Image (tube, rainbow, N blue to C red):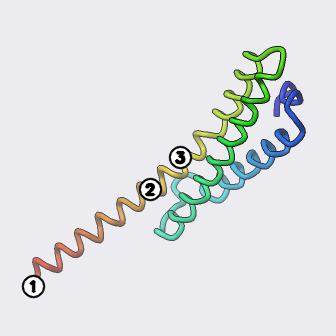
Amino acid sequence: MSASLCVFAEDGKQEFMQVSALVHALDERFPAGSIQTNDAAEVAIKESADAQTRLQNWYVVSEHHCYNTFFVNDCLKEIKVERRAYLPTLQRISLEAKALQRQIKVMERDRETAQKQSK
């Protein structure tokens, strides 16, 4: 966490640290290429969406706080940078899980089509 984040309210710092820890934990639980089942994909999608929601809520609250500081633009720039540091990880997890779900659906449709053709 950077030094200028100390201008944020204490609860904002706490929330950011919790979101940061959550994103790191998700990144460790779902490294690239690790989502192999539909159940794991559903969990990954739900948890990454929850983390994205928390990150966005933190951003909105922090943005509001920035408008009460003297260096508004510096503050806004800082929180944007902080948010951008975590979005790619959450998006990667979500995209990978959704891609697996699409692949599973295609395989199921292919299997059903093959069964219908064999009858």
The secondary structure type at the circle numbered 3 is: helix
Q: Which amino acid type corresponds to the residue marked 1 in the rendered image?
A: Lys
Identify the residue under disc 2: 98
The C terminus: image quadrant: bottom left
**x, y percentage for residue 4?**
85, 24
Q: Are marks 1 and 3 in contact (CB under 8 Å)?
A: no
Amino acid type, mark 2? Lys
- For residue 92, the mark is 3
Q: Is residue 30 left or right of residue 23?
A: left
Is the residue 88 above or below the residue 44 in the image? above
Judge from the rendering whether residue 19 lies leftward or rightward of residue 8; answer left or right: left
Distance from Cα at disc 2 to Cα at disc 3: 10 Å
Q: Find residue 119 and name its label.
A: 1
Distance from the alpha carbon under mark 1 to that under mark 3:
41 Å
Residue 87 pos. (x, y %)? 60, 40
Q: Which x, y percent locates residue 77?
A: 70, 21
Mark 2 to mark 1 CA distance (whole Å)? 32 Å
Please name the residue shown 46% across and 68% down the image: 38
Name the residue at the bottom extreme: 119
- Give me the residue at 48% from left, 65% from top: 36
Q: Earlier in the sequence, mark 1 or mark 3?
A: 3
Which tag, 2 or 3, sits closer to the chain's start? 3
Q: Are marks 2 and 1 in contact (CB under 8 Å)?
A: no
Label 2 vs label 1, nearer the camera: 2
Q: Give the residue drawn at x 11%, y 81%.
A: 118
Q: Looking at the image, which is closer to me, 74 or 92? A: 74
